[in-house]
Image (tube, grey):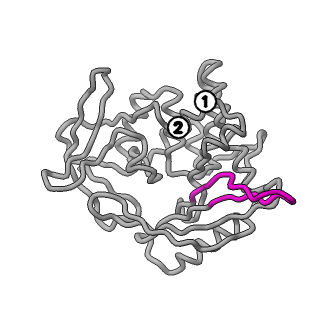
Amino acid sequence: MDESVSENCIEYENKDAASDVYAIIKSAEIKDYFRKENSMGIFEKEQLILHSYISVQQKTAMLKQLSSTGNEEENRKVDELYRVYREYINLIYHPLVRTVFLLEYVEQWWENDDIETDSNMIGAFDTVDEVIEEMAGIYDGKEVKCYGYGYVTVLQVPQDAKVKEVFTFELFWIDGKWQIMILNINADEREVQGIGEDTADRYGNTKYHCSLPFKNGDKLKIQLPFMEKPCYGILRSEKDENGCRSYWLNRNGKEGKRIDLTKWELFYYSGYSVLDWIERV
């Protein structure tokens, strides 16, 4: 299976997203809001792409398209991130040296107003296709609601050299198949590849916060793909001294965790975007 991303041939799995970046938002109300307001700047749209529940191939293609929509400096910065994604996808599907993929299976469930996980090392594989086949075997006959994800460590094994951990990626169940959704490139590797500080900062999402089309007192629900029942709460929102708005979900006055909705990612390093899994009740 050739899943590389070439410079001259980029295809979208979701054709609507080629002309409408908001099409990848899963929550219908939030999607309609941003389509109407079109309030995101180019780097917010970049964060939307990076945090969306779509494959890295589609993210890469959308970054390429986005890199022609801003001014010269904005386009240069987005294009640099596009090239990072393209390079690492090609390292997955067309390794330059012998590569080993270590698969760890991470099961997910909802407990105490948070995502709980348990992980098990499955084994080492020579290709990403073998990893995907193994994940399919793990879930053969299982209920969709109980799925987790595959966490894969990529090791390069050059001849006559030490084994090197290069990066990791995560496989999620997207559109009826296991697809790579998240690339994790550590700081040392980013430095080796010459990735600029600003691009690395945006990749790590330390600058930008989400905005939501809800107001104080709205009753909202969160339902992630593996949750049997949704989590309900009341939205609270306020601005800080710099005018930046924060959002959180209070659990209807019950004892429980106050769920932060301000950052792009819903729960720390979960892979789930705030814009995809929240709805008004």
Task: Depth check: give the residue in front, 10 or 60.
Answer: 60
Taking depth in this image into account, of 160 and 254 the one nearest to the observer is 160
Question: Which residue is at the front of the view, 18 or 278?
Answer: 278
Point out the stretch of residues depicted in magenta: 153-170
Q: Position of residue 257 (x, y in %)?
A: 24, 52
Q: Does residue 251 sit above or below 32 in this rendering?
A: below
Q: Is residue 33 above or below residue 104?
A: above
Of tags 1 and 2, the one toward the viewer is 1
Residue at the spot 45% in from the left edge and 45% down from the top edge: 25
Mark earlier in primary sequence (1, 2): 2
Q: Is residue 85 left or right of residue 257?
A: right
Left of 219 or right of it: where is 110? right
Residue in view at x 42 percent, y 27 percent: 39
Residue type, mark 2 in image: Val
Q: Find residue 224 and report its horizontal and vertical position in percent.
A: 38, 58
**Crowdedness of circle 1 by 10 Å Cα count: few (<14), some, many (20+)?**
few
Q: Residue furthest right?
A: 160
Amino acid type, residue under disc 1 in the picture: Glu
